[in-house]
Amino acid sequence: MAQTQDKDGGTSLKNSMQVSFKGISFTADEVHPAILTKKSEGNNTVTENLSLLSYEQQAQGTVTFKFRTEGEDEVSLTFAHNESDDEASLSIFASLPKDAESVSFSFKPSTGYSVTERTNSRQIFTSKNSTYSFSASKLTDEQIFISQKSPFATFSLYDPSTIFTFASLSPTLEVAGEQLYQEKMREFRAKLVSGTAEAMKMPSQLTESIVVAYMAEMDAQGRFEEALASVPESFKKGNKRTYLSAPYFGSLSTMQPSLSMKLRNMEEMIENAAGLTSLSSSALNIFTMEDLAEFIEVIGPTESVKKLLSIPSAIMSGNATNADGTEFKATVAQAAGIIRTYIALSKKNSQLAEYLAPAMESCVSAIESSCSLAADATVPGGQAILLAENDAPVPPVTAIEAGAALISYGEQVTSPEITTAGRAITSSALIRGGFDLATAADIYPSVVSNVDYPHCSLILRDGSIWAWTVADISYTQRNNVGTMLLKSDVGNIHYTILMNMPEFKNMNIYGLSYPSDPRFENYNSAGYVYRKQLKTLFLKMRNKNETETVRFTF
């Protein structure tokens, strides 16, 4: 930092940031300014120089520099170091405007250090006595780029002889602890609620996934009616809605076509992936879809579904190669999605999960091989699990989904080391952040186990009757009588679309015979309408008891 004295005796900051730590120094000044890169129309970008506005010593070893462009956009860079007898590291965090892509500034090795290895996102600094690893979103010979998607950079001691494994994680590693994980998950869920409440002040900022995640979380907290009342009418009656939000807000006849389209699209994607003539990475992309397992259960054990679920095992067994002839490995996102699909099918007691079982060990290894244990002063205990592939950091949201998949898998197979690794990955990514409200809402169903989130429910395999609902539904049928149990919180109003429902003679709700009524959604109670041409039942329920019974006479 530098100051100048004006003629009145006052002081002001020079536009000069200089930070030095161990083997590296960073600079931002008039000659080598920090630069903000922003998105513009047509997928183009614009750059603006940044000028130093202020700095603040927040705690011992932590300092934040604030910059501003001529257009009044503000950027802050926080440098934090952790140092002990056997460890020294520097973490850099960038806080960027929402429409920004990245911030960049200059760096160079300190005297006595040289760069001995370079990739797009990592450089190795070596001196006579020590070696450091420098990682960021992007690195050139003299510039560091910190992106909106991955807003952290690290400079930490490096030991090339150390190979990371989940088994090597110390049981005392703070970031892997159950208590810290639960704390960070509570913060994630609380920020989703508070962020949505803030976004509701400007309804145009709301997306359907944001509102649905908000409703599910509020319902889990026992605040369903509060949540329902807080969602703007402009959203409930607007054109942003699809089948996804139908269980909360109704309009079932209007939303049903989008649900049918979703099923058709999923069937087509499964057929296309299963029909590929050669094994390749594109065949695994479908597994990154959070709701794949639900629709696989609805579609059933078709030949396309069986073939699709057999692909991961075939690829993981070494039967697939890249275009250059090298052995193909699943990406972190693909591996996490395959594990997630396996767990979901297993919980549904589906025999289809057996097709994925042989790939599980390889999927865990694919995630494990992308991990490293790095010093990070922003994380409790000073160490975090970082993920990288193809010389680039894995986005935080992908890391969180990978961590969640490992936690679920570790619990299912009773592997404490996999569960611990999952917690460490998830907590590290949640602490490091780098995602907005919309992204948090998108990954919510993958990382939070919440039955109140809208989902498919297979009612009867014989006849392929299935429901789109937020209720916990079970169904039995004897002779000409079908009994459906819907479990939900007492007092909650919820809507269900039952697809492929055969025509029935009579329907009982609350022990009373109810007629089909096209105006059923207007009433403050239960009701339904049956569309014979669509073989679809639209149902509205208000649970007077935790579990309500609906009976059909066929």
Image (spheres, rainbow, N blue to C red):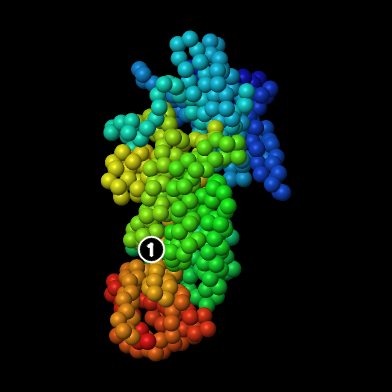
Where in the figure is residue 58, as x and y percent of width and height? Answer: 45, 30
Figure check: 162 above or below 545 = above
In the rendered image, residue 161, in percent from the top left (x then y), is placed at 41, 21
Q: Could you say which is closer to the camera, residue 491 or residue 511?
A: 511
Q: State the count of labels.
A: 1
Judging from the image, what secondary structure is the residue with disc 1 in?
loop
**Viewer-side residue, 329 vs 178:** 329
370 left or right, relative to 29: left
Q: Is residue 53 above or below residue 336?
A: above
Q: Nearer the viewer, residue 428 or 315?
A: 315
Which residue appears at 31% of the width and 76% of the height? Answer: 476
- Quadrant in which the C terminus appears: bottom left
Q: What residue is at 45 percent from the left and 43 percent from the top?
A: 316
**Label 1, on which residue?**
452
In this view, the residue in front, 241 or 192, is: 241
Quadrant location of the N terminus? top right
Q: Is residue 112 visible?
A: yes
How far from the left and from the top, in percent, is residue 429? 44, 40
Question: In the image, 91: left or right of 424?
Answer: right
Asked whether residue 399 is in view, the answer is: no
Residue 94 location, quadrant: top right
* Circle 1 Cα neighbour tier, 10 Å, few/some/many (<14 / 14–19 / ≥20): many
Which amino acid lies under the numbered mark 1 shown in the image of this protein? Asp
Question: Is 162 located above or below residue 219 in the figure?
Answer: above
Position of 41 with respect to 117 (left or right) is: right
Please give the name of the residue rendered at 59% of the width and 42% of the height, measured from the top-left corner: 97
Q: What percent of the width, then of the height, locates residue 64? A: 51, 30
User: Which residue does the image show at 55% across and 75% down from the upper left?
Assistant: 254
Relative vertical location of residue 220 with respect to residue 428 in this rendering, above or below: below
